[in-house]
Amino acid sequence: MKDAFGLPQSLLVLGGTSEIALATARRLITRRTRTVWLAGRPSPALETAAGQLRARGAEVHTVAFDALDPDSHETVLGKVFAEGDVDMVLLAFGVPGDQASDERDPASAVRVAQTNYTGALSAGLVSARALQAQGHGSLVVLSSVAAERARRTDFIYGSSKAGLDTFAQGLGDALHGTGVHVMVVRPATVVRSGTGVRPGPGRARLLGGLPEAPLTTTPEAVAAAIELGLRCRSETVWVPGSLRLLMSALRHLPRGVFRRLPVQ
């Protein structure tokens, strides 16, 4: 069960090698989280991540999970929930793709969509049903600022995240009043820990001379925002918070004006 501050004692991560997910798990372990399930494709990276969390005092299990195999989701995730209540599911898997390459190769573009949207839709529905059956829990869905408006440099990735974002909002409405809390997290471009490398093609360009800071964030900052969102039972979390106003302005710009901005 969650503690008095709304923080989970048990956590299931879908996308067990995600930097944001692992930063969130580390943060929650320092609070009250004691059991963590890391679900992802079997790999040395997944086992390393599990070992690092065990070193912090948590009981950690790894689960073989493939976003592109939705037929297996009910069985795989059902086994986790059969072990006991799960207080929080963090849906954190996804791929950025390569816009230029994906435009030339529709099969690659479809793979991005299947991973980021249809795979997440399947896993999200399975998790939501399990949380509803136990009568409590949070489903935290990692969306992206890219979901807010199509851009020339990442509209394939952005469209997949837009579908996921809309799905998660609707799922939250469907589950309202059931005891299950759905929270959508929309981070800016994430700077990888300790590297300064920004994933994806050109997602953090300057906006009309504005400083780049409002357009970037870190895994640790997203983790902190997720914790605050859980405490407040927020439905939507922007990271950083200043993005809410910025994206509201960009979303309502006429397309002809938007095309001329240096964010394309």
Image (cartoon, rainbow, N blue to C red):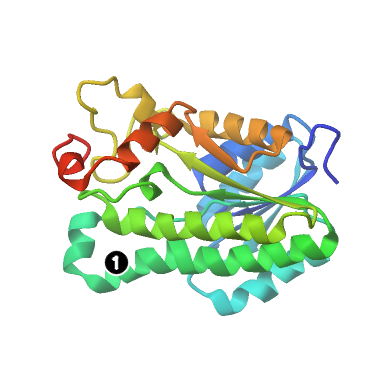
Residue at horizontal 36%, vertical 23%?
213
Residue 6 appears in the rendering? yes
> Where is residue 36 shown, x and y percent of the image?
72, 48
> Where is residue 33 shown, x and y percent of the image?
77, 39
Residue 252 appears in which quarter of the rendering?
Answer: top left
Q: Viewed as shown, does residue 57 lie left or right of 101?
A: right
Residue 245 appears in which quarter of the rendering?
Answer: top left
Secondary structure under tag 1 reads helix
Label 1 CA crowd tier, 10 Å (few <14, some 14–19, many 20+)? some
Residue at the spot of label 1: 109
> Where is residue 26 shown, x and y percent of the image?
65, 35
Residue at horizontal 76%, vertical 51%?
137
Reply above or below: 212 against 3.
above
Q: What residue type is disc 1 on?
A: Ala
What is the count of numbered marks?
1
Residue at horizontal 29%, vertical 20%?
211
